[in-house]
Amino acid sequence: MARPGHVRIRPASDCDVADIVDLLNQHDPSPQTEGDFRRWLGTLSPRLACRPFVALVGSGELVGFAIFQQTAINAPIGHYFVHLKVHETHRCQGVGARLWHQMTLEASRVSAKGLYTFVREDDQPSRVWAERRGFAVGLVRHESVLDVDAFAERRVGEQARERARRCPTDTTIHDMSRYWIMGAEWTRLAGVFARLFGDSPGVPSPANTSFEEYFERTWIMNSRLDSRAFFVADHRGKWVGTAFAIRMREHQPELWSQFTGVLPEFRGTGLAYALKLRTILYAAANGFRQMRAFNLSGNDRMLAINDAFGFQRVPGLMWMIRG
């Protein structure tokens, strides 16, 4: 048993990445590789606070991991993200308490106005742990999955296909493969995303960082980005909507549908259905067996679109806020 006094909190750089990934993958429905973890660290902007820590016992056995980070665009200014993971064989032994103490020290160091964390909807013990430390549920990020084979075989999603075919005839959809990845057109796409995401139901404002910066470092800098999976709706030369998807885990036949949105004046026209359809057809054509979609609570319109395409809801993440 690890006694609190025998738990050492050290920077994550003192521990092997493989051991950290093994710990993070415990009970994770979408496990990551060492490459995934290193790539995620690489997407973090240098100016954003990001301090990962590990909890060690004995001669260096890894029993816990925690990260203190300023990151998400849907977090209020001054709020920092914290995430703790304790090895299942060392829970209720003071490891979490030591890691949490380190998080409070980091919060004091930067004069954080508040903290937030994510807890899976079906993880009741973690929710109780967070609530005991003053966190309360703010938003829910719903998740749903689509059997791409079932869609390709037309066993699901027929009604949504028909709705997509009725989008405005003077609006065309094309992917971003024709443009240089760091060129002006991608900057233009970042601006479109900024406006659409900021207008999405459930997104608090103001946010920690600019939408353009978030888009660049999270998507454009991702080495597994395929520009053929980024789509733009063009209405007489004006970009009025976008949808994009990305593979977030190595060696997994799953595509993550990250965003679909259109300008307010184009909502209800079928254009969002048409954009979502293009990402699904991309998945089917490129060997993905499953798609995963995410929706913030309050965005009932997009939840309905995903349901129509045949996405099945699974436990999502509760965004819990403290302060």
Image (cartoon, grey):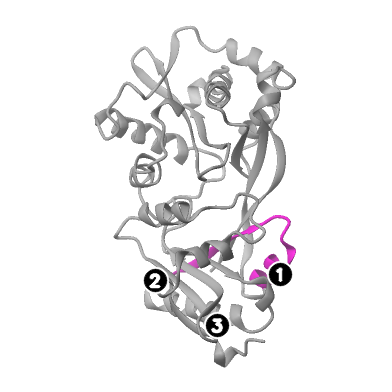
Is 198 placed above or below 135 here? above
Decide if residue 299 is on the left or right side of residue 179.
right
SS category of the residue bearing label 1: helix
Judge the density around disc 2: few (<14), some (14-19), many (≥20) Cα neighbours within 10 Å: few
Query: Picture coordinates of residue 288 (x, y %)?
Result: 58, 31
Decide if residue 71 is on the left or right side of residue 165.
left
Residue at horizontal 53%, vertical 19%?
A: 271
Residue tagged 1:
128
Residue tagged 3:
98
Residue tagged 2:
13
Q: CA distance from mark 1 to mark 3?
A: 17 Å
Q: CA distance from mark 2 to mark 1?
A: 30 Å
Judge the density around disc 3: few (<14), some (14-19), many (≥20) Cα neighbours within 10 Å: some
Q: Which residue type does callout 1 highlight?
A: Val
Q: Nearer the viewer, mark 3 or mark 2?
A: 2
Query: Picture coordinates of residue 199 (x, y %)?
Result: 48, 37
Is 40 placed above or below 177 here? below
Residue at horizontal 68%, vertical 22%?
A: 151
SS category of the residue bearing label 3: helix
Of mark 3 and mark 2, the one earlier in the sequence is 2
Image quarter for residue 236? top left
Query: Among all residues in the image, which is located at the extreme left?
Result: 184
Query: Picture coordinates of residue 117 (x, y %)?
Result: 56, 62
Span of residues in magenta: 112-131
**In the foreground, 190 or 12:** 12
120 inside magenta stretch: yes
SS category of the residue bearing label 2: helix
Query: Picture coordinates of residue 5 (x, y %)?
Result: 56, 92
